[in-house]
Image (cartoon, rainbow, N blue to C red):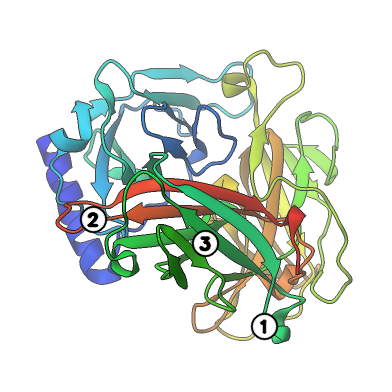
């Protein structure tokens, strides 16, 4: 365990030196269906109130029944290492083995399902608000994956309103987030420096906007009504499919084939950027595990090989296409990269997914490495998106960034 912590500290140091902030580690291909949330949440980005429980579940498809361990670390607002020692933010112990796991039952794909709840017998609770990372390790002291989460306190009120872009060049393609932070419990000291915000669209930290300063300060009320600083590309409604019954084609599935496991061939998708906006209800990139005629979907839902196909013009050298969603934490990995099939004249990829209802979208990575989410789907101001605003405060002389409030808004109520 000491070696595991030392390795984590070394990885943390070098990651911080190279990237300026700690990045999440994506899992290997045999780790699937990571669900990470609080007790009252459906999203896969836990933003939970101090004292509420945290749940992490995942499947290991290698059939080895390995032992996995978890480590929890506290971080500053900018994801640099926090100066707090473990005993200051954690009551009990981490570096503990995940004790709860079950093997799959009556499935073509063999897997082990692991579940962790915090607090538990070893880890009694987390004591401070702010940013955290939980990392999962194996017996060989190798980090398998890590996930970010946040714990907040209700010290301020955060009002969130979604507007069409105030920049007329992007009025049809962007949405702007207006924020009002009200505080009656204490006085902000130098809020231009001590108050920081994080704005998240559809629980995707990769596209979040950070460190926007208050535009107006009136007493203990901070207002943000920017033209461009708090605006996001609107995107489009997510595509979706459902395969709760592996024996029959369901929503979004064109046909199935039983090989070593069931294969689901989704309908071929095309470019939506050049088409009019069409309202198509989604769950903002999320997924739900579900299966018919199963009592315990955690271990009885099967895995299928899902085949994605996209009709798209031939890419320029250096460009890449991916399919992603909350099901893989919006990661850009070789497994979910689309390759050109010359015979079918489509871009395609295939990977294993547990039975359920899934949102997904196709995105383009440009030659310079920038992410273009609207290249395939388009950007439409009417798109329904979820926004969360996190407010951090580090008072003069304080040692860490408190997360003092969270606000949420939806573009269903968008206005000019």
| Residues under numbered marks 3 and 2 in contact, where contact means CB atoms less than 8 Å apart | no
In the picture, the quarter occupied by the C terminus is: bottom right
Q: Which numbered mark, 3 or 1, is in the foreground of this view?
A: 1
Q: Secondary structure at mark 3?
A: loop
Q: How many marks?
A: 3
The picture places residue 296, in percent across and down from the top left corner, at 62, 16
Q: Tell me if mark 3 has few (under 14), some (14-19) or many (20+) residues whose alpha carbon lies within 10 angstroms of its own.
A: some
Q: Is residue 371 left or right of residue 66?
A: right
Q: Secondary structure at mark 2?
A: loop
Q: Which numbered mark, 2 or 1, is in the foreground of this view?
A: 2
- Which of pointers 2 and 1 lies earlier in the amino acid sequence? 1
Residue located 12% across and 40% down the image: 3
Q: Secondary structure at mark 1?
A: loop
| Residues under numbered marks 2 and 1 in contact, where contact means CB atoms less than 8 Å apart | no
Can the viewer see residue 383?
A: yes
Q: Which residue is mark 3?
A: 332
Q: Tell me if mark 2 has few (under 14), some (14-19) or many (20+) residues whose alpha carbon lies within 10 angstroms of its own.
A: some
Q: Nearer the viewer, residue 376 or 407?
A: 407
Q: Which residue is mark 2?
A: 395
Can the viewer see residue 205?
A: no
- Which of pointers 3 and 1 lies earlier in the amino acid sequence? 1
Residue located 29% across and 26% down the image: 125
Q: Nearer the viewer, residue 318 or 124?
A: 124
| Residue at the farthest front position | 219
Q: Taking 72 as reference, is 335 above or below it?
A: below
Q: Which residue is mark 1?
A: 167
The picture places residue 264, in percent across and down from the top left corner, at 76, 43
């Amino acid at each position: 365990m000491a070696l595991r912590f030392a390795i984590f500290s070394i990885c943390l140091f070098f990651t911080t030196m190279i990237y300026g902030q700690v990045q999440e580690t994506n899992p290997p291909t045999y780790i699937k269906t990571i669900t990470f949330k609080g007790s009252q949440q459906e999203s896969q980005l836990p933003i939970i109130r101090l004292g509420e429980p945290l749940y992490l579940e995942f499947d290991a498809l290698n059939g080895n029944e390995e032992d996995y361990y978890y480590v929890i670390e506290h971080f500053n607002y900018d994801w640099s290492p926090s100066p707090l020692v473990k005993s200051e933010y954690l009551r009990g112990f981490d570096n503990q083995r995940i004790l709860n796991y079950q093997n799959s039952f009556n499935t073509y794909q063999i897997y082990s399902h692991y579940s962790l709840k915090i607090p538990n017998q070893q880890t009694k609770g987390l004591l401070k608000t702010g940013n955290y990372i939980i990392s999962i390790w194996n017996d060989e002291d190798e980090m398998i994956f890590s996930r970010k989460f946040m714990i907040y306190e209700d010290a301020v009120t955060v009002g969130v309103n979604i507007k069409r872009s105030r920049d007329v060049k992007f009025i049809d393609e962007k949405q702007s987030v207006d924020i009002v932070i009200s505080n009656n419990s204490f006085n902000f000291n130098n809020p231009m420096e001590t108050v920081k915000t994080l704005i998240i669209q559809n629980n995707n930290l990769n596209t979040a906007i950070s460190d926007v300063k208050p535009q107006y300060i009136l007493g203990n009320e901070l207002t943000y009504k920017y033209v461009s600083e708090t605006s996001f590309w609107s995107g489009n409604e997510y595509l979706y499919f459902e395969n709760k019954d592996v024996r029959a084609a369901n929503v979004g599935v064109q046909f199935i084939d039983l090989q070593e496991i069931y294969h689901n061939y989704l309908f071929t998708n095309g470019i939506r950027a050049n088409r009019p906006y069409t309202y198509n209800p989604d769950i903002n990139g999320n997924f739900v595990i579900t299966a018919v005629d199963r009592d315990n979907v955690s271990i009885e839902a099967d895995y299928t090989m899902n085949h994605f196909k996209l009709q798209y013009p031939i890419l320029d050298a250096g460009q890449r296409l991916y399919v992603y969603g909350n099901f893989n934490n919006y990661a850009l990995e070789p497994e979910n990269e689309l390759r050109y099939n010359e015979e079918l004249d489509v871009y395609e990829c295939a990977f294993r997914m547990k039975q359920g209802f899934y949102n997904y979208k196709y995105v383009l990575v440009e030659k310079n490495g920038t992410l273009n989410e609207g290249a395939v789907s388009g950007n439409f101001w009417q798109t329904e998106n979820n926004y969360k605003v996190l407010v951090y405060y580090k008072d003069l002389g304080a040692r860490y960034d408190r997360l003092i409030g969270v606000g949420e808004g939806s573009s269903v109520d968008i206005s000019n």
